[in-house]
Image: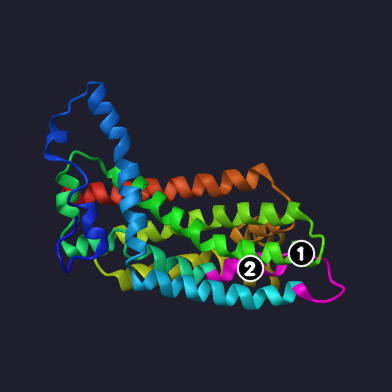
C-alpha cells in the first residue's frame, strides 16, 4: 500500500510482491507467481485511476462531448446510427488519451517508485504489459456509459447494430494504439506534462495531419494513398460496419511495436 502522500500509482512499487517472491525460483510456484505479476500491476493501475482527478476530468470531457455529438445522430428522418459520434471520437481521443497515459511511467520515475519496482522480482515486460492492461481497462470503462446512447436508439428507432458494434471494436483498437503511444512517451521522461504534449504531437501527426493532407493538399497518387491508410481511414471503415482483417492487424501490430519500444526504453534506463 502506498504511504501517505504518495501518488496512487506508488502503491504499484510497494506491497505488490512479497520479498519471498524473489526466491520463488523456476519451479511451478515461481512460474505461477510470474504469470500473476502483470495482472496484479494492471489491477493496481486501474484502481489508481479512480483516485486521480485527471481521470475524472478526462471522463467528464469525453462523456460531455460525446453526448453533444450524439444529438447529430438523432435527427428526424435520418438513419438510426452512431456514425457521427464514432467518427468524431478519434479526434477527441487525440487529446483525451494523453491525459490517461501521461503518468503511467513518468509518475513512477518522478516519484522514485520505479527503482523499487524494478528491483522486485518482475521484468520490464511485466511492468509495461501490466500498465497497458490497466489503462485499456479504464478506457473500456470510459466507453461503457456511451452504451446508453445505443439504448436510446433502440427505444426510439431500429438501429443497424452491425456498424455500431464494429465501431466499438474499432474504438477499442484505436484506444489501444493511442495508449501504447502514450505509454511509450511516459517512459522517456519524468515529466507528466512533457509526456502528454509528446503524445498529443505524435497522435496529431499520425491521425489529423494525414487526414488533412489527403483532403487539402494536391499530392501524388502514391502519397495520397499512403495518407489514407493511416489511422483515421482505417478506423472510419469500422464505423461504417466494415471489419477488415488488415485493419485489425495494423492496429494490433502497431500497438505491440510501441509496447516493445517501451520495454526497451525502461531496460535502457534501468541499467543507465
**Residue 2 rendering spot, x and y as whole percentages:** 18, 59
Can residue 204 be seen in this snapshot?
no
Tell me if residue 78 is in the magenta stretch.
yes
- C-alpha distance separating marks 1 and 2: 35 Å
Q: Is residue 171 left or right of residue 255?
A: right
- What colouring does the structure picture have? rainbow
Tell me if residue 216 is in the magenta stretch.
no
Q: Which residue is mark 1?
A: 155
Numbered mark located on residue 231 in the image: none
Q: Is residue 241 left or right of residue 148?
A: right
Work out whether 38 lies above or below 54. Answer: above
* Of pointers 1 and 2, the one earlier in the residue sequence: 1
Residue 123 or residue 141, whichever sits in front: 141
> Going 69% across and 62% down the picture, which residue do you hit?
150
Q: Give the residues in magenta.
A: 74-92
- Dot 1, how many residues are within 10 Å of its Cα: few (below 14), some (14-19), or many (20+)? few
Work out whether 99 lies above or below 181. Answer: below
Can residue 122 be seen in this snapshot?
yes
Q: Is residue 63 left or right of residue 73?
A: left
Residue 15 or residue 236, whichever sits in front: 15
Q: Which residue is mark 2?
A: 211
Q: Nearer the viewer, mark 1 or mark 2?
A: 1
**Residue 24 rendering spot, x and y as whole percentages:** 17, 28
Q: Which residue occupies the extreme right position in the image? A: 77
Quadrant of the rendered image containing residue 193: bottom left
**Residue 192 rendering spot, x and y as whole percentages:** 30, 69
Amino acid at each position: 500500500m502506498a504511504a501517505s502522500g504518495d501518488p496512487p500509482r506508488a502503491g504499484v512499487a510497494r506491497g505488490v510482491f512479497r520479498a519471498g517472491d524473489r526466491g520463488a525460483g523456476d519451479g511451478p510456484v515461481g512460474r505461477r507467481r510470474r504469470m500473476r505479476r502483470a495482472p496484479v500491476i494492471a489491477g493496481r493501475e486501474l484502481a489508481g485511476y479512480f483516485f486521480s482527478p485527471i481521470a475524472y476530468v478526462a471522463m467528464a470531457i469525453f462523456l460531455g462531448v460525446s453526448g453533444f455529438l450524439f444529438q447529430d445522430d438523432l435527427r428526424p428522418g435520418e438513419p438510426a446510427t452512431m456514425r457521427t459520434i464514432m467518427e468524431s471520437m478519434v479526434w477527441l481521443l487525440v487529446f483525451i488519451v494523453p491525459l490517461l497515459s501521461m503518468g503511467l511511467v513518468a509518475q513512477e520515475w518522478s516519484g522514485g517508485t520505479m527503482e523499487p519496482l524494478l528491483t522486485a522480482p518482475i521484468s520490464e515486460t511485466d511492468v509495461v504489459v501490466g500498465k497497458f492492461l490497466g489503462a485499456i481497462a479504464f478506457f473500456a470503462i470510459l466507453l461503457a456509459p456511451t452504451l446508453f446512447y445505443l439504448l436510446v436508439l433502440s427505444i426510439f428507432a431500429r438501429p443497424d447494430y452491425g456498424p455500431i458494434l464494429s465501431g466499438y471494436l474499432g474504438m477499442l483498437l484505436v484506444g489501444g494504439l493511442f495508449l501504447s503511444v502514450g505509454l511509450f512517451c511516459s517512459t522517456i521522461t519524468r515529466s507528466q506534462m512533457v509526456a502528454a504534449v509528446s503524445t498529443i504531437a505524435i497522435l496529431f501527426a499520425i491521425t489529423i495531419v494525414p487526414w488533412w493532407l489527403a483532403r487539402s493538399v494536391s499530392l501524388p497518387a502514391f502519397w495520397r494513398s499512403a495518407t489514407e491508410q493511416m489511422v483515421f481511414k482505417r478506423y472510419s471503415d469500422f464505423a461504417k460496419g466494415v471489419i477488415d482483417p488488415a485493419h485489425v492487424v495494423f492496429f494490433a501490430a502497431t500497438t505491440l511495436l510501441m509496447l516493445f519500444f517501451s520495454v526497451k526504453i525502461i531496460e535502457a534506463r534501468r541499467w543507465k
